[in-house]
Image: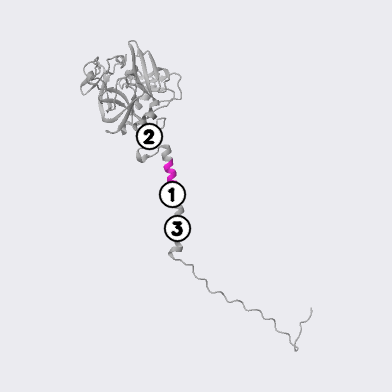
Amino acid sequence: MTEPFRQNGEYPPPPAYPAPAPAPASLPAPHRSGRRARGPLALLAAVALAAAAVGGGTAYAFQTLTGDDSGSGGAKNVNGTSVSTGSKGTVAGVASAVSPSIVEINATTGSGKSTGSGVIVTSDGEIVTNNHVISGATEITVRTSDGKTYKAKTVGTDSKKDLALIKLEDASGLKAASLGDSDDVQVGQEVVAIGSPEGLTGTVTSGIISALDRDVTVSADPGRGQGGEGQQGPGDGWPFEFGGEQFNGDTGSSKTTYKALQTDASLNPGNSGGALIDMDGNIVGINSAMYSPSSAGSAGASGSGSGSVGLGFAIPINTVKGDLAKLRAGATG
């Protein structure tokens, strides 16, 4: 190793190194004024609000598309008679939605023919109607709203409730009605009636619920239904009793009384078995009887005064739903 160079016999001092740079002054504490501190939080809040707005819009769109609007009495339908959102609460909307589920029934008996109405309750052709429409029939023909005709057979009858269930032959893809809840019906509520009065298929009338739990008495003798509504004079229909008086003829000695919905929607002979409908498209009653001034006390009365005067009666749909299992099992009587 080479010896370091000496100067005046001494080793030179080691080279001087630069002094370390002075420590920087302390950095100022972060500024925590309200404005700067809220900047990021405000941004996060804005994002959250935007997400909430989108979520709310999505929920609204879902409710609109599904009809699930419990806050405004939205439709509860699970079948094909839901009224579209834009037409909800209108007679036109109800008529458009429900008419395909209402049929005309023509029954042939040993004494002639009669016409009534019915409500499709399954897509393969189960139809609810009044017992007096088909009682005693040897042949039943049904015409749907699109003009197609089917043969039908009686499945079950209940004369004590004036109800019957018939089944179309070789039917499929029909539009079944949505059966509502008649316990929710209120006096003054708007309703629509659809049926085939005097054979005028698909006739639509409207009105309100005039009263609840009216005692309507009808014949419980299935044989009295032979000939149905078409065998009596113009303006007459199935005999019934109300308020201690008989209308549309003699109800006979075998009678039954049921609680009915009263409506001022126009009902005429041929409406029997058709639908009384709420404004969401749900069936709330099966039309069964109507009062005509000229029919009081006389089975054959007719004339210009006959026809509906706004006193009609319908069997509550909850009564119908409670009877369906029995009718499907083939009950008679």
Q: Residue at x 32, y 29 (%)?
A: 192
Q: Which residue is mark 3?
A: 42
Q: Quadrant of residue 113?
A: top left
Residue 53: within the magenta?
A: yes
Picture disc at residue 313 = none
**Residue 44 image position (x, y, % from top left):** 46, 55
Q: Is residue 120 at least partly visible in the picture?
A: no
Give the farthest residue toward the top: 110
Quote the CA–CA distance across marks 2 and 1.
Answer: 29 Å
Q: Residue at x 36, y 13 (%)?
A: 108
Q: Secondary structure at mark 2?
A: helix
Q: Main secondary structure of the magenta part?
A: helix
Question: Label 3 amino acid?
Answer: Ala
Q: Residue at x 37, y 20 (%)?
A: 104
Number of marks in the rendered image: 3
Q: Residue at x 44, y 66 (%)?
A: 33
Picture disc at residue 87 = 2
Question: Label 2 amino acid?
Answer: Ser
| Start-end of magenta stretch | 49-61
Question: Label 1 amino acid?
Answer: Ala
